[in-house]
Image: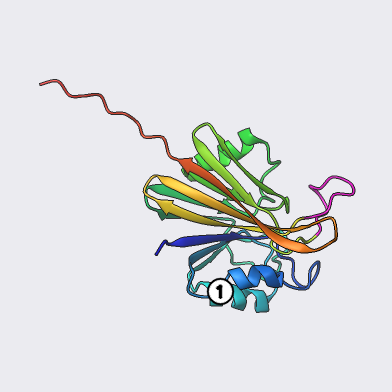
Amino acid sequence: MAFLILVIGDLHIPDRALDIPQKFKKLLSPGKIGQTLCLGNLTDKHTYEYLRSVAPDLKIVKGRFDVEAASLPLSQVVTHGSLRVGFVEGFTLVSAEPDLLLAEANKLDVDVLCWGGTHRFDAFEYMDKFFVNPGSATGAYTTGWSKDGEDMVPSFCLMDVQGISLTLYVYQLRKDVNGVENVAVEKVTYTKPVESTPASTS
């Protein structure tokens, strides 16, 4: 069975959202997830306990609104297969410009950088590194990064790492024209470039 890594953040419960959507909770049943990377703004103990029940191996970084969790680190790095994965909430970044994200990835010496704070899903490859923003698992509103009138789409990501390759599954709770909510899943892949070693001459 694959070792799946849950990447989740910007929950803001109960201040900006009541709970993680039920349709997401059905997908996050205990025993399926090997590790959780929480990108901050967890803000309440009940949600912390829930995430621990999904995967006891829970890694958390401090978000701007995690005021009661002063001891949380601002960044963390985990290694899976041949990939180093770093994660931050994003409030320590000046902006989400690719060059600034690349600088953060280089500072942490990681192949994959997960960042939060925008409440909007994003994933792209830049300068041989992979960047992932899982969005907000609750679809909580944001005060700084959204465009006027933009609806926040609840989302989270699962990562499956095999050696130098990563498959990212993005889950988004979208409404159809009738207002019915359905979970849409997309897949994005990344493979770490392998430096070719020159053949030795004897």
User: Quick check: 50 above or below 63?
Assistant: below
Q: Position of residue 18 (x, y in %)?
A: 78, 73
Could you tell me the amino acid type at mark 1? Answer: Ser
- Toward the viewer: 125 or 57? 125
Which residue reaches farthest front?
Answer: 178
Quarter holding the C terminus? top left
Q: Position of residue 137 (x, y in %)?
A: 69, 62
- Residue 21: quadrant of the picture: bottom right
Q: Residue at x 62, y 33 (%)?
A: 99
Image location of residue 61, percent across then percent down: 59, 60
Q: Secondary structure at mark 1?
A: loop
Residue 53, by quadrant, is bottom right
Q: Is residue 9 shown in magenta?
A: no
Start-end of magenta stretch:
141-152
Residue 143 falls inside the magenta stretch: yes
The residue at the point 51 percent across, 45 percent down is 112
The residue that mark 1 highlights is: 29
